[in-house]
Image (spheres, grey):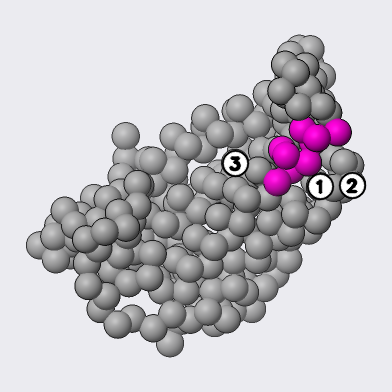
Amino acid sequence: MKATHFEFRFRMAIITAVIVLGFWSPWIQWLGIGSRISLLESLALELSRLGLLSFTASAPVVIVVAALLAAIAAVLRVWGTAYLGAATVQHSQMQAGAVMADGPYRYVRNPLYIGTWFMLSAMSFAMPATGAALVMVVLSIFQLRLIFAEEAFLQAKLGPPYEAYLNAVPRLAPRLRGAPTATGAKPRWMRSVLSELNPIGVFVTLAVFSWSYNHWVMVKAIVISFGLSLVVRAFLPESDS
């Protein structure tokens, strides 16, 4: 169930490829499976069809839900990166420094992976429904594989201190009470914000541009935010010091 070193090294490329496939959804054109209507519109139509809300009310509700998912993603990604360090987060190989038990890591072991999952959930609202389903199933499994691989690596490298951390902090469901005492690590907020422009861009897309109800405007905004994040990351220092 653990991801291989190849999968970890090329995790960004793999995630990007699956996301592109989700937006493209070629089976709609080739096999006639599903439709090009975005998940956002599909959910709004379904709420209207079931008589739960009128379409004029259901569309804003779905947009707000999608924007909230994106906001959670941006907060978790920026918060987690601020403490772990952008260089560590972006590194192509697994890194084993001191056990991190500050910031969000006091409450849950994998805030960055959880943040990525929320970002993918938010992005899926701009995809065709079948593409969104593919992305969420495939990348949820992939995220779990990455988590299991990284935790096994850290346990082997850090030994008893990390094992104690494993016992104290849950993997995915945050524990708000009984969290370990903070070790005093200092967050690097500015560098974290710059390195996490992609989830921030997804939030801006859903909070601002989705109100145009124009699917292609949302897709273009997401692509632009992703491209901008790559450019900014390329100019960030390789070290967090």
Q: Name the residue under label 3.
A: 121
Front label number (1 vs 3): 1
**Magenta region: which residues?**
56-64
Proximity of marks 1 and 2: CB atoms separated by less than 8 Å? yes
Asked whether residue 204 appears in the rendered view, the answer is yes
Viewer-proximal residue among 153 and 56: 56
Type of residue at label 3? Ser
Sequence-first tag of 2 and 3: 3
Residue 76, horizontal then vertical, whole percent: 49, 60
- Residue in the picture at 60% in, 28% down: 134
Element at badge 2?
helix
Q: In which quarter of the image is the C terminus?
A: bottom left
Q: Residues within 10 Å of mark 3 (few under 14, many from 20)?
A: many
Give the label on residue 210, or none: 1
Element at badge 3?
helix
- Residue in the picture at 44% in, 66% down: 80
Instruction: Say left or right for 121 vs 159.
Output: right
Give the label on residue 212, or none: 2
Instruction: Say left or right for 82 vs 49.
Output: left
